Amino acid sequence: MGIDKFRRKSVFKAISVNGIDLYGGLGLPAIQGKVYYVEGNVGLDTQDGLSWDKAKKTLASAITASNANIAAGLSGYASRNTIFVKADAITEDLTVPPVKCDVIGCGSCNEQNRTRIIGAHAWTCSGTLMGSAFYNIEFWNDAATAIFTVASVAGLYFGNCQFVAKADAIHAIHITGATGHDLKIENCRIINDEANDPFDTAAILIATTTTFWNFEIKDSYIEGDIGIKIDTTNLYNGRLDKCVVKAVTLPLDDNSDDLVWTNNIFISAANATTPNNVIDANVKLGGGNYLTDGTVGTILYPVNA
């Protein structure tokens, strides 16, 4: 099935990036690379994955095929591939990122209009060997680790995704390594599980040892023991905008003092003696935020930004 027919059948809604249709401007596909298909219920990894009729069973197999295609020559290397994935749920630990590729969840998983992937994913990346994007996917963990542990991020995007703190997960996303750049999270939900258990350490963590450039979270809802924890003192071009961050202790803990935080709602279950007890960030870079905790109630914060 051609991707344009796939869209016209309304199986998957159009995606826009920065106001430009990623799929289907004027009804035409905007894809310039290979398209692969994963059907977790009835696919086979021995198939080429180039149509729904010949879909692969696992996302890992499709990533392997896509990465080989991207690396095959200059034409492929300048393109972005696409993987469409559907299943009731796929259980696998991804050990290799999809290079220069958009992974898009479609179909349904129970009541969710997303594809569910259950597992813990650990990647070591460098240079240009990444550029990975995920859309419309729900991520669960199956162990008390991070859902994503990524060393040396080189371009990672999540759009309209949901991360659930299953199996006592400690982080939704943990960034490690000496350096990294370009992590963007947009219109996502990072949430407690049904028992209201949060991500046990921090929903999003950038490690002490990592120097990171271009970090942005916007229009998202985040829950955790700590919401966002930037342990490194070397974060540059960081921005948190129009998010709701709900935490047991600190919604935001920024040791770099370089994060710009604007137009957010921070909610803490802690009883702070001052707002600074539940927000640790450079007040000179904050503006238009609201803070709610057990002591001060709801206030505009910082008051004198």
Image (spheres, rainbow, N blue to C red):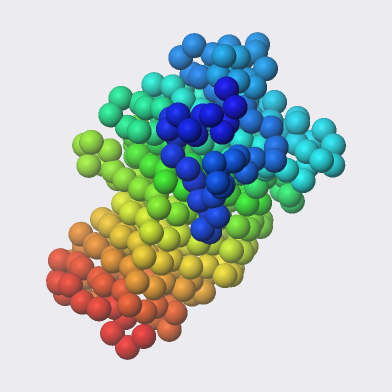
Residue plotted at (42% across, 32% down):
10
Residue plotted at (49% across, 11% down):
42
Q: Position of residue 90 (x, y in %)?
A: 46, 23
Q: 209 or 260, which lies in front?
A: 260
Residue plotted at (35% across, 48% down):
189
Res. 56 in view: no
Q: Quadrant of the C terminus?
A: bottom left
In this rendering, the count of numbered labels is 0
Image-quadrant location for residue 302: bottom left
Report the side of 226 relative to 273 (left or right).
right
Q: Quadrant of the N terminus?
A: top right
Report the side of 227 relative to 69 (left or right).
left
- Residue at the extreme right: 73
Q: Position of residue 210 (x, y in %)?
A: 60, 58
- Residue at the extreme bottom: 304
Report the side of 106 relative to 36 (left or right).
left
Report the side of 93 relative to 152 (left or right).
left
Image-quadrant location for residue 226: bottom left
Q: 54 or 290, which lies in front?
A: 54
Q: Is 95 drawn above or below residue 284 in the view shown?
A: above
- Residue at the extreme front: 26
